[in-house]
Amino acid sequence: MKTFRVGIVGCGAIFPMHAQSLKNIRRARLEAVCDIKPGLAKARAKAYSCRPYSDYSEMLKKESLDVVHICTPHYLHAPMAIEAVRMGANVIVEKPIAIHPKDAGRAIEAAKKNNVSLGVIFQNRFNPGSRLVKKSLEAGTLGKIKAGRIIMSYHKSDEYYKKSGWKGTWDKEGGGVVIDQAIHFIDLVRWFARDSVEYVEANVSNRMHKSIEVEDCAEGIIKFKGGAYICFYLINFYSYDDDAAIELDCEKGRVNIVKDAARIGLYNGRVVSAKPGKDEYIDYGNGVKDYWGYCHYNQIKDFYDSLRRSKKPSVTGLDGLKTQEVIWAIYESSRRKKKIYL
């Protein structure tokens, strides 16, 4: 059985979720890591017994990698993915797949042309609560979704943004609370709906952050072609990170998701629920938050399993594009003060 030669580009905050996950995946060997900060790359390489690089193109040329994980700032996702797939590597990229949907389309086309796989990290699809809801919707247990809502109240201080040279900017991050935090929950409701989006109408604003140029508040509606609609209210200036909540009002019952746990109350009186067990968490290292248990590991494992079976991963580049179209439409709707039809 093939052992995959793997490289990770970007050694920052999200790096441990990928590197530690790889340690638990059979026949996936981390060969190299890359970061524009040479000291950080060397430290990560020493910790994982691999080779450090400060130049991404050099790593691709020298290492003959089978898989590249992209954990860099948002504006680099698409160009780095395109370069890697042209070198024959399969790519799994952190969300978003790109800032602009057109760049996402270019990455998808490049992967298709070079006959390699392109996956996008949306790890919340892999937690027990999300899986239960998806399974119940597909089985018809809940009937159709009539409406839903997303409420997210996180805390990102000005100091959080000042630590980074790219967060809080339109050109490098592509936005604020919507593209960085809420994108996970917007992806979930799109995945649950199993329907195309008809239009998005939204407003974004900066209410509390003085040091950034992007939004810290967003509200609006996502309307699906089948009639369902999702209302959302999103902020990242609350006093603490509250657990994000999703509610779905369906024909046969009501869904309540809080963080990674779900409760389904059917109108016939039956109640089902799911949440992670105490053993469903990976130690990503001292001081690193758990990122909702095994979610990252489960998705990364799914990606490698799909490569071994020569199948598409559960979350493809096209999935990343469709969610990014909604994100882009939220910003466009606010900017143009009108509904954006997709």
Image (spheres, grey):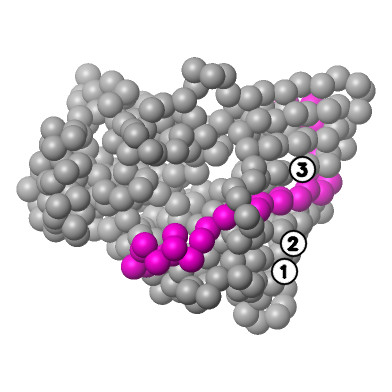
Residue that numbered label 2 is attached to: 221
Image quadrant assignment for residue 44 = top left
Estimate how packed mark 1 is, as few (under 14), some (14 to 19) or many (20 or more) residues with alpha carbons within 10 Å: many
Image quadrant assignment for residue 198 = bottom right
Q: Are marks 2 and 1 in contact (CB under 8 Å)?
A: yes
Q: Is residue 243 magenta?
A: no
Left or right: residue 28 versus residue 316 is left
Q: Amino acid at mark 3?
A: Glu
Left or right: residue 271 versus residue 208 is right
Depth order, front residue of 248/67 = 248
Of pointers 1 and 3, the one earlier in the residue sequence: 1
The residue positioned 92% from the left and 23% from the top of the image is: 268
Q: Which residues are magenta?
A: 138-167
- Asked whether the viewer can see residue 179, the reply is no
Q: Which mark is residue 312?
A: none
Q: Is residue 244 above or below residue 38?
A: above
The residue positioned 38% from the left and 38% from the top of the image is: 287
Quadrant where the C terminus sits is bottom right
Residue that numbered label 3 is attached to: 247
The secondary element bearing badge 2 is classed as strand
Residue that numbered label 1 is attached to: 201
Label 1 – label 3 distance at C-alpha? 19 Å
The residue positioned 74% from the left and 61% from the top of the image is: 221
Q: Position of residue 202 (x, y in %)?
A: 70, 69
Q: Is residue 151 magenta?
A: yes
Q: Are marks 1 and 3 in contact (CB under 8 Å)?
A: no
Q: Nearer the viewer, mark 3 or mark 2?
A: 3
Quadrant where the N terminus sits is top left
Of pointers 3 and 2, the one earlier in the residue sequence: 2
Q: Position of residue 296 (x, y in %)?
A: 43, 35
Left or right: residue 339 versus residue 91 is right
